Amino acid sequence: MPNWRNHPDHQDQLRDSVRTPTVIQKRRQIALLPDLDITTIQQKERLLKEADQALEIVKLGADMLIGIVLSDAKRRQGLEGTLGLEYTVLAKGFDEALHQRQTDFGWAAKNEEFARLRAEVDTLLKGRHPFHWPLEFRRCLWVRG
C-alpha cells in the first residue's frame, strides 16, 4: 500500500486545489466582528455558514486524494485525470460562489455536483472515514511562514 502522506502529488494537489484560504479568511472576519447587535450576529452566522461550506469542499478533496491513492495502480491514474479534474473545477466554482454570495438557485448545480462527487469518493473509500488533522486542527498544526 502506498504511503499517501509522502505521495508526490498529495501535498501539491491539496495545497493548490482546495480553498483553505477562504475558510481562514471567513473565520478571521468572524473573530473581528463585535457582538453588538443582531445585524452583526447575523453577519457572523452567514460567515460561519460560508466557512463551513468551504471546509466541506476541502474535506472532499482530502478524502478524494486518499481514495485515489488507496485505489489499485491501474485505476489510480484514470481517477487522477477524471475525478481530480472534476474536483478542481467544483472547488473553484464553490470558491467563486462564496465570494459572490450566490443565491440558492446559483448553488443548486454546485450542490448537486458536490453530492455526486461525495458519493463517488465515498465509494472509493470503501467505508473508511479519514480524519484530516491539518483541516480539523488547523490552528494547532499550521506553521506560519
Image: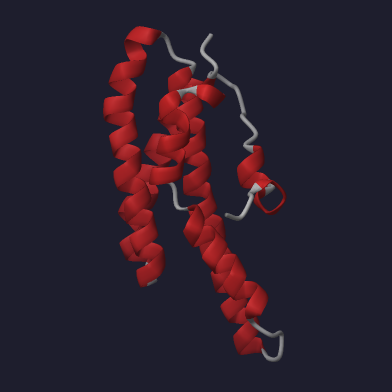
In this view of the protein, which residue sits in the foreground, 112 or 4?
Answer: 4
The percent coordinates of residue 52 (x first, y second) are 56, 57
Residue found at x 34% / y 62%: 96
Looking at the image, is 19 positioned above or below residue 78? below
Q: Left of 76 or right of it: where is 124?
A: right
Which quarter of the figure has residue 76?
top left
In this view of the protein, which residue sits in the foreground, 49 or 75?
Answer: 75
In this view of the protein, which residue sits in the foreground, 78 or 101?
Answer: 78
Residue found at x 62% / y 37%: 132
Residue found at x 32% / y 64%: 105
The percent coordinates of residue 23 (x first, y second) are 53, 59
The percent coordinates of residue 10 (x first, y second) are 46, 30
Residue 102 in sight in this render: no
In this view of the protein, which residue sits in the foreground, 85 or 16?
Answer: 16
Residue 56 in sight in this render: yes
Which quarter of the figure has residue 99?
bottom left
Looking at the image, is 86 positioned above or below residue 41? above
